[in-house]
Image (cartoon, rainbow, N blue to C red):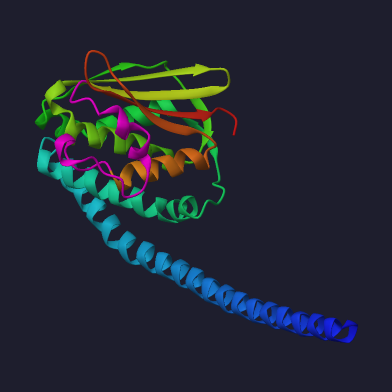
Amino acid sequence: IGIMGVSRDITATKAADERLRQSEQRYRELSGLLEEANNMKELLLDVITHDLKNPAAVVSGLAEMLLEKQSGEEMIRLIQVSSRNILTTIDHATALSSVTLGEELETSALDLAQIVREVAGEFTRELTEAGLSVSYDLPEHLPVKAHPIVAEVFRNYISNAIKYAGSGKKLIISGSLKRGNARVCVKDFGETIPEKFRKNIFQRRIQLEKGARRGRGLGLAIARRIARAHHGEVWVAANEPRGNVFCLRIPVNE
């Protein structure tokens, strides 16, 4: 009986060793595929940024030259603003990839109050067409250490307000600095997002049901990743008497 037991143990050990060997081989294969995919992703990013940046820069430069001759031409100004936005998006492509992979971002001294004002200025035409006025309750400066990609959070908030909160007729952008954290909120007076959607709305591919208008999917998921990359958070709360308050909080010295 003892010999049989030893034999069974040896057989079981060999089987376990074989499973472990197969597991390790599979792990090495998957690691190789992942490394190859990451290398391809980096190459694709390099191609996109190089091939798109050059023509976008040409368009931006030509628009600037035309504006010098026809300073009041709104269509030319829109081309210039849009081409600059494309250039900014291209510059942020690598950072956005890092955010998606959960990697650390390089940060520098920035002023959130200035950034959010500039972002709102980018949407002047769209805000006017949507019948939305913008007022500010911001300190003169909101100094933080952050990556410029943080501006994408505000672009998303304001863009969503234009799409979904035009009925409220106004936006209030507020900011504060408390307990080592900078906070900026975009308050609208449109249709209030139901409470059951508020936590999930920042998850990827989560969209509002048709009763609350479909949308607010991928952009808010990216905003959430950007906040987390800055060791901060994003959220939405109900406004009173109606509407929503979309907020970003990030530590000042991260």
Please determine whether, in this image, residue 132 is positioned above or below residue 145: above
Q: Tell me the quadrant of the picture where the N terminus can be found.
A: bottom right
Residue 240 x %, y %: 26, 14
Question: Hey, which quadrant is residue 18 in on the image?
Answer: bottom right
**Which x, y percent locates residue 145?**
54, 33
Question: Does residue 128 appear anywhere in the picture?
Answer: yes
State which quarter of the image contains the C terminus: top right
Residue in the picture at 52% in, 51% down: 102
Quarter of the image holding residue 141? top left
Q: Give how far across and how far down residue 37 sits, in percent.
A: 48, 72
When asked about the image quadrant of residue 20, the answer is bottom right
Total marks in image? 0
Horizontal side of 215 relative to 234 (left or right) equals left
Q: Nearer the viewer, residue 181 or 10?
A: 10
Q: Nearer the viewer, residue 184 or 216?
A: 216
Residue 148 in sight in this render: no
* Bounds of the magenta segment: 189-216
Tell me which residue sits at (31%, 17%) in the image.
136
Residue 94 colored in magenta in the image: no
Answer whether residue 211 is magenta in the image: yes
From the top left corner, tell me how far across and down residue 214 is, in percent. 19, 42
Q: Nearer the viewer, residue 80 or 70?
A: 80
Going 82% across and 86% down the picture, which residue do you hit?
7
Residue at far right of view:
2
Vertical relation: 189 (above or below) 87: above
Q: From the viewer's perspective, is 155 left or right of 79?
A: right
Q: Which residue is at 57% across, 48% downward?
A: 104
Q: Main secondary structure of the magenta part?
A: loop
